[in-house]
Amino acid sequence: MIETARISLVVIFAVVGLFFTFVSATGVIRLPDVFARAHTASQADTLGAGFGLAAVALTLGWEPATVKTVLLLLFIFVTNPTAAHAIARAAYEEGIEPWTTGDERR
Amino acid sequence: MAASEAPRLLVPVQRSVTLRQTVDYAIREVLESDADEPTVHFVSMATWRAGDPGTNTDRNRAEDLLEDIEIWARYECEEAGVDPETVDVETALIGLDEYLFSPSDYAELLTSYAADHDLDRVIVDPEYSLVGHTTLIQPLEFELQQTDLAVEEAPVDRPTSRGRLVSRPNPARFLAVFGTSFLFYQILGGFSGLFDLVTGLATAAVVAITLSSVSFYSDPSLTESPKRILRGVVYIPYLLYEIIVSNLLVARVILDPRLPIDPRLTKVKVFVGSGFPLTTLANSITLTPGTLTVTAENQELYVHSLLPFAREGLFDGSLERWVRFVFYGREAARFPSPRERGDTEVLQEPTASTTAVTDGGSIDDTPECGSEPDDDSEPQGGVDR
């Protein structure tokens, strides 16, 4: 019984992770400029990877390797926004003006 | 340099390696002119605000420093064979009732202090530093040149030309880095026996020796650091909740065929203190979907926001409050939001054509712009630098 619940939770987490990764990819394609794309490329992905890793941790069960997945998760939460910030900042310093509604699509 | 008029000096002070020499230089300067009643004011500018929790030690430290300076000044007078009573040495702790962040804030405070006490010359310690790791001398000089104060840098011999990020060896920092890396090693190794303990000790020693001098910019303390870590642990679930909620909202918008986005660059002035707290806040803002920290200037964050609701959330300042809570405790969390303070600004105002969206349909009844536009906000194109 508990085993079934665990497996269903693993499936749910994996699917939710997949969903957010899909949203992230869609956003990168659909959004108009580098700033908007940096949003979705990093953030939706954070949750995508997060749920994916949660599924991995649940599959592994109570093991040392599980701790490592949690650590991985922590690092993703630190590095992902840093990367997004670096991209946005580089674009800003290049003088790229953020797209606003009404502008031509780039 | 000797003027017939009595010199009236203002010296901003902060603990630094060259402070003693700066004090000596200021005293020598006033003694050289043989005018009556020369005046030197040594002022310490508060980087905190009086009454904020946890600032008592800062205050005591500043007051100790000012006492030391009075002793040094008297000593220097006696060395020069002058009666210390003939030199008017005053010390003051200023800026207690406000938060000061940028060099212009400090310059403003110094200028008004100088005006109040009729001082006309400023001597700055070349290592003078209040804001993060940078010395304040160049920006401060620049700001003060706008006023009619004379500014000069005290000529001092620096003991070494050390890099600013590198602090002197310090047992507390060493132990903190050593402990953290040892624990991390054991977690990765799964706490598996003697071999890991020995190699872990060796690795942690190498890490601590090489990195402990750049890992902190203030000493970890036994009372404050654990409290901060605990409050950080409380913060994480809240941050996760925020991330999930706004992720769902952003996902809905991205998957919407009409793509109803309304991106704007905004500027928010935040009050969390420079360095690590600011980084934490900027990273939390970026982690929350819909808002992206583009760049930070002093305490002003340029945040790109994708949707009006994200902007609202940012201007409500809940993340700022949480970061204040994590770093300074519950008392500091009670603080007006950026909107209430008037520290928000939408840099790209909606233009007349906003409603006529060129691709992907129109914005339905979402408000044009997340907040009441500030009076002084720049028009479109204000982001060019």
Image: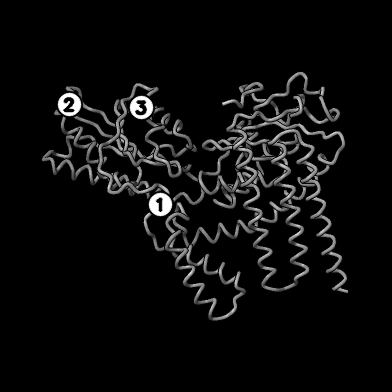
Disc 1 marks a residue whose amino acid type is Val
Residue at left 22%, top 38%? B25
Taking the image as shown, residue B13 lies to the left or right of residue B306, namely left
Please name the residue that numbered disc 1 is placed on: B166
Foreground mark, 3 or 2, reads 2
Residue A49: name its quadrant.
Answer: bottom right
Within-10-Å neighbours for mark 3: few <14, some 14–19, many 20+: few
Q: CA distance from mark 3 to mark 2?
A: 24 Å
Q: Nearer the viewer, mark 1 or mark 2?
A: 1
Residues at discs 1 and 3 both on one chain: yes
Report helix, strand or loop for mark 3: helix
Q: CA distance from mark 1 to mark 3?
A: 38 Å
- Name the residue carrying label 2: B2
Q: In x, y percent, where is residue B44? A: 36, 40
Q: Position of residue B118 (x, y in %)?
A: 31, 25
Q: Quick one: label 1, few (<14), some, or many (20+) residues within 10 Å?
A: some
Coloring applied to the structure = one colour
Q: Hey, what amino acid is under mark 3? A: Asp
Chain of the residue where label 1 is placed in the rendered structure: B
The chain ID associated with circle 3 is B
Q: Residue furthest left?
A: B81
